Image (cartoon, helix red, strand yellow):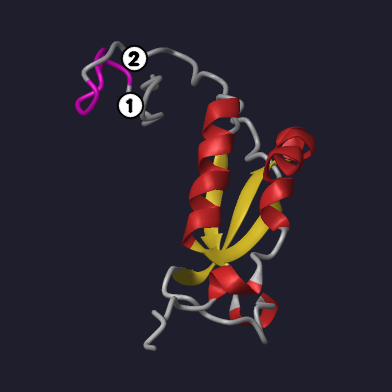
Amino acid sequence: MFCPQCRTEYRSGFTRCADCHVALQPVLPAEPDNEPFPKLVGILDTNDNFVLGMAVAALDEAGIVYDIRPIPESERNFEGRLEPKWLISPSRIMVCTEDESEARLLVEPLQEPMPVEFLTEFEPDQS
């Protein structure tokens, strides 16, 4: 006798699982088929909090499921850029391969670097 939930085997004479409180079955049911975890691809690398927020909003609006992961040190490519106050730790937006084309179209405008005048702090004219 087997519990169909926790898959524990019981001696004959038992009728209910002591843990799950469900009726035992004479044969252990087949293992449920678990769907494989979807393959994810990176569509946007950024260390700009505004860009990340706009990308996430676009993906949410399109109904695209995403994950945000930190970019490992070995894969970072943000050298030589000015660092305004809104920068965050480098992050990568990941989506399922099935959504890659649509997601890339949504975040493509965000790939452009900001003009230098927006990257520098505003200093009032002191004349």
- Helix, strand or loop for disc 1: loop
Predominant SS of the magenta segment: loop
Residue 21, label in figure:
none
Quick one: quadrant of the C terminus? bottom left
Which amino acid does the dot numbered 1 rest on? Tyr
89 to the left or right of 98: left
> Relative to residue 76, is residue 65 depicted above or below?
above
Mark 2: amino acid: Leu
On the image, numbered disc 1 is attached to which residue? 10
The relative height of residue 125 versus residue 22 in the rendered view (above or below) is: below
User: Image quarter for residue 47?
Assistant: bottom right
Could you say which quadrant of the image residue 61 lies in? top right
Identify the residue at horizontal 67%, vertical 39% (top origin).
38
Q: Which of 122 and 78 lies nearest the eye of the viewer?
A: 122
- What is the CA distance from the residue labelled 1 to the residue labelled 2? 8 Å
Q: Are marks 1 and 2 in contact (CB under 8 Å)?
A: yes
Q: Earlier in the sequence, mark 1 or mark 2?
A: 1
Q: Residue at x 42, y 74 (%)?
A: 85
Image quarter of the N terminus? top left
Residue 46 placed where, x, y %?
60, 64
The crowd level at tag 2 (other Cα within 10 Å; few <14, some 14-19, many 20+) is many
Q: Residue 13 magenta-drawn?
A: yes
In which quadrant of the rendered view does residue 82 lie?
Answer: bottom right
Q: Is residue 72 visible?
A: yes
Residue 122 x %, y %: 44, 76
The stretch in magenta equals 12-20
Residue 86 highlighted magenta (yes or no):
no
Residue found at the far right of this picture: 101
Residue 24 badge = 2
Instruction: For mark 2, give the secondary structure.
Output: loop
